[in-house]
């Protein structure tokens, strides 16, 4: 190699050794008789020093080096007089005797340091430069470790990694597909997989037993902040198992990753039914790092001429410990918070349980102190606490109160990013009714098995049927989900019928799977983890983009390679595609 060491490894134990380093000039400083250069590579930074007195010619040459020049520098490891305890190599510097420019660099469009002056778009456009920054680089190193440790664990458990195709067939369920025109089959299209779901099930029919794949998936959804049209899953499937086996196996994976990658011991891994998650936290991905559970108040509050409560389907609240001291202004801010359009509440009722034991509320006109006392008991509130109450339809009250709970968790510092609280949410409903299209949709996907004890309800009350489906949630983030699958042709067919497929449609779309079920399909089930999301959670960031080497921006564009882009007329002709080009193209 062109170097003897990396820029991250030299310490006092190498003192007086002759070494050669290679890397990028991060920064240079001229201090009278001395010139200092920080040389950077993937492994770290090392200080190079040039001395005007001992070698003026070399020092003058070094002063000409621009930022991001690629150089090789040879010299002797010396002890620094001014040590930097924050740097791994902070005890030493290289007294350079000779250097060579391996390549020059234009001045980069932003500073390549931990705190950069580059804005988001600029850094995305020059992502290869942004990736030189240690913070971004470390994110990819974390991702690499997560991938390796995932493979180690699953390999040890007897899983084998199988690649499934990327050019598959468009199906109407789920999100929108990305499609690829086929040149050799005029007028026909492949689709990119939203997940390898049907293929991994077919691998179970083939007898592979335990499959996994760290795999790219594609969904053409409207982009919300922090969604990527292509993303990576840890995709898994197992045969001859129960739901319990799957939960145990992947609880194991999660604990293993926390231990290996973060040195965190996960102590408890509770399970909560979907129904309880909704009742106590108002959503199916509760952040259980803190309590503040929902308390339902319908029975206590109705019939006191307070119309808002009387007309509501649900009156529900949380108790914020120690918040009775909140000022009017703070309470108004909370009211504004729940009334934001995305949270959707009409207003907020509060009850202060004051330190002296008296109760003061925003609805004193309708309720006596005695009645408020009963509410306080229901909340298990103590003097000094603040009760916050919302009313409305169940869905709306759940939504707004769950946002308010998280906000109060933030305000009270209860959502510590160094604490990790995973749980399983289980017993999801099989189906979800959609008012607009007046039909049922599969809550997870159409291959999910109903709970055997609920199968009879499929005919009488499909909305009540619970599924053998589960999500893994960590700190309020859904990081994975899966289910036990249907492995019986007739039940699968029935499921498609419930989802509004005609027999012909079901056969055309999923005939291959139902046919496979006639050749000895074993009972099976699986799960997929959002790998990008897991990495960002482990890295302590909200943004999955930071953990993807070359991500797309919020409009789904890669601004570095400038994609998507029009294609040439010849390409379109070859594909027999007629495209109405917008004017500006
Ligand atoms: N294929 C499912 C998904 O992508 C996960 C699973 O059921 O295994 O969400």
Image (cartoon, rainbow, N blue to C red):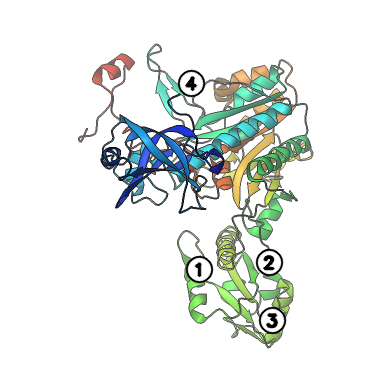
The numbered mark, 2 or 3, whose residue comes first in the sequence reads 2
The numbered mark, 2 or 4, whose residue comes first in the sequence reads 4
Q: Secondary structure at mark 3?
A: loop
Is 87 on the left-hand or right-hand side of 319?
A: left
C-alpha distance separating marks 2 and 1: 18 Å
Q: Answer above or below: position of 384 versus 466.
A: below
The numbered mark, 2 or 1, whose residue comes first in the sequence reads 2
Give the camera-side residue of 535 and 379: 535
Residue 411's spot in the image, x, y percent?
Answer: 55, 67
Q: Residues within 10 Å of mark 1 (few under 14, many from 20)?
A: some
| Residue pointed to by mark 4 | 167
C-alpha distance separating marks 1 and 3: 28 Å
Residue 267's spot in the image, x, y percent?
Answer: 75, 50
| Residue pointed to by mark 2 | 296
Q: Answer above or below: position of 375 versus 168.
A: below
| Residue pointed to by mark 1 | 346
Kindly tell me whether mark 1's CB lies below 8 Å from ligand 1. Answer: no
Give the camera-side residue of 69 and 402: 69
Answer whether labels 1 and 3 touch (C-beta < 8 Å).
no
Q: Secondary structure at mark 1?
A: loop
Between circles 1 and 4, the one closer to the viewer is 4
Q: Residues within 10 Å of mark 2 (few under 14, many from 20)?
A: many
In the image as oriented, which residue stretches furthest toward the left?
A: 583
Q: Which mark is residue 383?
A: 3
Give the camera-side residue of 562 and 482: 562
Can you say which quadrant of the picture contains the C terminus?
A: top left
Is 466 on the left-hand or right-hand side of 349?
A: right
């Amino acid at each position: 190699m062109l170097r003897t060491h990396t820029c991250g490894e030299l310490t006092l134990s190498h003192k007086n050794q002759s070494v050669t380093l290679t890397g990028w000039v991060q920064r240079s400083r001229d201090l009278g008789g001395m010139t200092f250069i920080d040389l950077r590579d993937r492994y770290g930074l090392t200080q190079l020093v040039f001395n005007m007195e001992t070698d003026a010619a070399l020092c003058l040459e070094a002063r000409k080096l621009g930022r991001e020049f690629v150089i090789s520098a040879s010299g002797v490891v010396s002890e620094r007089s001014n040590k930097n305890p924050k740097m791994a190599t902070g005890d030493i510097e290289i007294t350079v005797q000779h250097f060579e420019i391996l390549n020059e660099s234009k001045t980069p469009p932003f500073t390549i340091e931990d705190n950069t002056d580059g804005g988001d778009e600029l850094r995305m456009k020059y992502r290869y430069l942004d990736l030189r920054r240690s913070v971004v680089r470390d994110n990819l190193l974390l991702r690499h470790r997560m991938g390796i440790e995932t493979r180690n664990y699953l390999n040890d458990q007897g899983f084998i990694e199988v690649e499934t195709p990327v050019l598959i067939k468009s199906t109407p369920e789920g999100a929108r597909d990305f499609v690829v025109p086929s040149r050799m089959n005029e007028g026909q299209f492949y689709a990119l997989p939203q997940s390898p779901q049907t293929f991994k099930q077919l691998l179970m029919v083939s007898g592979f037993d335990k499959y996994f794949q760290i795999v790219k998936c594609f969904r053409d959804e409207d982009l919300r902040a922090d969604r990527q049209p292509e993303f990576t899953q840890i995709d898994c499937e197992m045969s001859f198992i129960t739901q319990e086996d799957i939960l145990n196996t992947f609880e194991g994976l999660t604990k293993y990753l926390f231990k290996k990658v973060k040195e965190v011991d996960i102590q408890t891994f509770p399970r909560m039914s979907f129904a309880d998650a909704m009742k106590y936290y108002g959503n199916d991905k509760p952040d259980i790092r803190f309590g503040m559970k929902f308390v339902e108040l319908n029975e206590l509050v109705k019939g006191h001429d307070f119309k808002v409560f009387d007309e509501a389907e649900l009156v529900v609240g949380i108790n914020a410990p120690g918040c009775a001291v909140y000022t009017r202004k703070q309470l108004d801010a909370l009211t504004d918070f729940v009334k934001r359009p995305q949270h959707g509440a009409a207003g907020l009722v509060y009850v202060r349980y004051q330190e002296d034991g008296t109760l003061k509320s925003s609805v004193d006109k309708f309720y006596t102190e005695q009645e408020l006392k009963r509410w306080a008991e229901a909340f298990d509130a103590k003097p000094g606490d603040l009760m916050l109450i919302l009313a409305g339809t169940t869905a709306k009250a759940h939504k707004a109160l769950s946002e308010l709970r998280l906000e109060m968790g933030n305000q009270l510092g209860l959502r510590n990013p160094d604490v990790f609280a995973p749980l399983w949410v289980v017993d999801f409903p099989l189906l979800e009714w959609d008012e607009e299209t007046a039909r049922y949709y599969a809550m997870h996907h159409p291959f999910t098995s109903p709970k055997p004890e609920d199968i009879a309800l499929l005919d009488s009350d499909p909305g009540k049927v619970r599924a053998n489906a589960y999500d893994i949630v960590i700190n309020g983030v859904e990081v994975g989900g899966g289910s036990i699958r249907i492995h019986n042709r007739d039940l699968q067919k029935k499921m498609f019928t419930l989802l509004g497929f005609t027999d012909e449609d079901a056969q055309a779309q999923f005939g291959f799977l139902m046919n496979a079920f006639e050749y000895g399909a074993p009972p099976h089930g699986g799960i997929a983890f959002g790998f990008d999301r897991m990495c960002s959670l482990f890295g302590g960031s909200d943004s999955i983009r930071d953990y993807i080497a070359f991500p797309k921006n919020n409009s789904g564009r890669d601004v570095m390679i400038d994609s998507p882009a029009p294609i040439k007329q010849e390409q379109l002709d070859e594909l027999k595609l007629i495209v109405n080009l917008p004017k500006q193209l």
